[in-house]
Image (tube, rainbow, N blue to C red):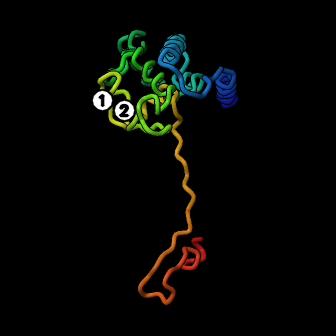
Amino acid sequence: MFSDILESLWHSINRARTMETAAQGILTRDEMENRRLLAAEDLQQGLTQSQVARKFGVSRTTASRWHRALNGTGMEALRKRRAPGRPSRLSAEQLRGAAEIYQAGCRAAGFDSDRWTTARFAEAIHARFAIRYDPDHVGRIMHRLGLRERTRSRRRMVDVLYASRFSPAPVLSRAEISPTVA
């Protein structure tokens, strides 16, 4: 009896190892829908939620949610729906135009330097399309269009000078105040 349990466990573990796993990364909405529908087929064929989770590289909670939706309203519940949120005020053609404005350069848009900022790009979009965006949101648009990467530059610590009315030396550097901090 104990050997039967061990044997069934061994088979289930090895069966789970041989299942393909989804590649880790960002999936498009179509790829996610396809993954849900394939998982639904596996659930209908008798695979457990844990096996489906392992096979498709998702959590057991997600597999359980798919199983519940499948049992509730069927395959239609697992199909993609319209994305939530407010639709873009710029059409696809206007977004291409915004990318062209960016590629043409800051001076071509009427600014006095070659450096784009989100505030300048927001002004350029407003001037061309009469649509006003917050500079923070313009940064997201720039990123979505592939016009800039979201990287934060690390600033080098400059040797700041400190003065204290209580110290005999009128000006102290950071290293002089605390050698362990410098």
Q: Quadrant of residue 181?
A: bottom right
Q: Which residue matches tag 2? A: 122
Give whichever of 107, 63 is nearer the camera: 107
Asked if 40 appears above or below 12 in the picture, the reply is: above
Q: Amino acid at mark 2?
A: Ala
Asked if 63 appears above or below 172 in the picture, the reply is: above
Q: Which residue matches tag 1? A: 132
How dense is the environment of label 2, judged by Cα within 10 Å: few (below 14), some, or many (20 and up)?
Answer: many
Contact? badges 1 and 2 (CB < 8 Å)? yes
SS label for mark 1: loop
Q: Where residue 174 sits: x, y (%)?
A: 54, 73
In the drawing, does residue 60 fall left or right of residue 12? left
Q: Where residue 99 sits: x, y (%)?
A: 47, 23
**C-alpha span from label 1 to label 2:** 7 Å
Q: Quadrant of residue 159?
A: bottom right
What residue is drawn where x is 37% and y is 16%?
Answer: 91
How dense is the environment of label 1, judged by Cα within 10 Å: few (below 14), some, or many (20 and up)?
Answer: some
What residue is drawn where x is 57% and y is 79%?
Answer: 176
Q: Where residue 95 sits: x, y (%)?
A: 42, 20
Q: Amino acid at mark 1?
A: Arg
Disc on the earlier residue, 1 or 2:
2
Q: Quadrant of residue 141?
A: top left
Q: Where residue 169 sits: x, y (%)?
A: 51, 86
What residue is drawn where x is 49% and y is 90%?
Answer: 168
Please identify the quadrant where the N terminus is shown.
top right
Give whichever of 152, 107 is nearer the camera: 107
